[in-house]
Image (spheres, rainbow, N blue to C red):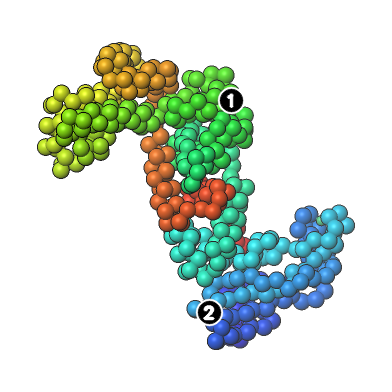
Amino acid sequence: MRDTELYRYLLGLKEPWSVSQVGLDVSGQRVDIWVEHPKGRLWPCPVCQKQEALYDHSEERVWRHLDSCQFQTFLHARPPRVKCSEHGVKQISLPWAEANSRFTLLFEKFAIDVLCRTSIQAAAMILRISWDEAWHLMDRAVKRGLACKVPREIKTIGVDEKSAGMGQNNYITVISDLERGTVEEVTEGRDSLSLEGYFRSLTPRQLVAVEAVSMDMARPYISAVEKTWENGREKIVFDRFHLMGHVGKAVDTVRRQEHLELKKSGASLLTGTRYIWLYARENLPMRYWDQFWRLRDSDLKTARAWAIKEGIRRLWSYRSATWAEKYWKWWYFWATHSRLEPIKQAAKTLKNHLYGIMNFFQHRITNAKAEGLNSRIETMWKTACGFRNKTRMRIAILFHFGGLNLYPVTH
Ligand SMILES: [Zn+2]
């Protein structure tokens, strides 16, 4: 078999394309392949498919293809152009690459597989492409995936804000499908528009299908839901893990204040106990047990605050909303009569948002899946050494967690 014939076969080229020349550069470790077509044939207009005679050729273009052994392999061709009576002069679509890509379809497919499984640096090294080329491939894959995504019904939506690196106002909003565990969209900021914008992108049918939105008690997100649906309030479920976070913070404030007071009169029992109080009872590591039980049975304010925090966790174990409501009233009384200011404040904040806490018993959703996604995003973020900007962050998140079909169509 001649090398031109071999490469025609390896590239999967079909009529009318054939390989005219193969150049091997051993010291440069590369193979260059030139592809051509016979004269005098008709080509389809890429818009209307009408067969037209050749008009001219574009400049020679080069596409990176899968390596031949360890040799980087490049495909060269001058794409034919036709002059369609309706659409003017157009370059025909080439069977080995998508329009505007610097890579052949087979290379893109392989690169997507590599990029899905490792960090962008590692992928760039394995594929022997630049960092920017790797981004270019991911960007194309995400755009392709979004373009062919069919609008589907999302019953439960999770909303999370996420810090996007340096700076106070550097946030993104991650919107996910809680049932499927996919990220649906990533928007800039954490204001009302960050979420409203996404809702506006939904079709009327998709909007009707949304049953509940799980989120933190953040005013902008609340108002985005209220603006989008008349009965928006009924759809809001405040995520229990976020709620526990607020109560946990109150416990920490109590601990800090008490620690300072105790230190004034000598050694504080609370030295080095910060993390102990943040654990849920059953998750406390064994090494803390002794110390913890001694502290818990003391008359420390922090121990009382902790007991109240653990108390609210029981709320979510109720099956009936009526019983949950009774339990809530009991807990609220306990918290507001605790004489612990931060705990009282936290309880009042919760009370102001009670509708969304009680909606849990209607929808029974939490951001747990979204939190899982968040921690995976975090890991990805670390291995990528951060992102240069929010646009790239969005691309990376949708690439890895969007559940999109990223591959180009090969024929
Ligand atoms: Zn045409």
Q: Quadrant of residue 263?
A: top left
Left or right of 30, for residue 51: right
Q: Residue at x 54, y 53 (%)?
A: 388
Instruction: Answer whether residue 124 is visible to the viewer in this image.
Output: yes
Q: Quadrant of residue 74?
A: bottom right
Residue 104 placement (x, y as % from top left):
61, 67
Say if 222 sits above or below 289 in the image. above
In the rendered structure, which amino acid carries the disc numbered 2? Phe
Question: Disc 1 designates what residue?
Answer: 228
- Total label count? 2
Instruction: Answer whether residue 354 is visible to the viewer in this image.
Output: no
Question: Disc 2 designates what residue?
Answer: 71
Residue 101 placement (x, y as % from top left):
65, 63
The reply to whether the residue tagged 2 has its Cβ within 8 angstroms of ligand 1 is no
Q: Residue at x 83, y 61 (%)?
A: 89
Q: Residue at x 53, y 21 (%)?
A: 232
Camera-nearest residue between 210 and 304: 304
Q: Residue at x 69, y 65 (%)?
A: 94
Camera-nearest residue between 34 and 302: 302
In the rendered structure, which amino acid carries the disc numbered 1? Thr
Under circle 1, the secondary element is: helix
Camera-nearest residue between 243 and 81: 243
Residue 373 placement (x, y as % from top left):
42, 44
Under circle 2, the secondary element is: strand
Label 1 neighbour load within 10 Å: few <14, some 14-19, many 20+: some
Say if 229 sits above or below 202 in the image. above
Quarter of the rendering occupied by the C terminus = bottom right
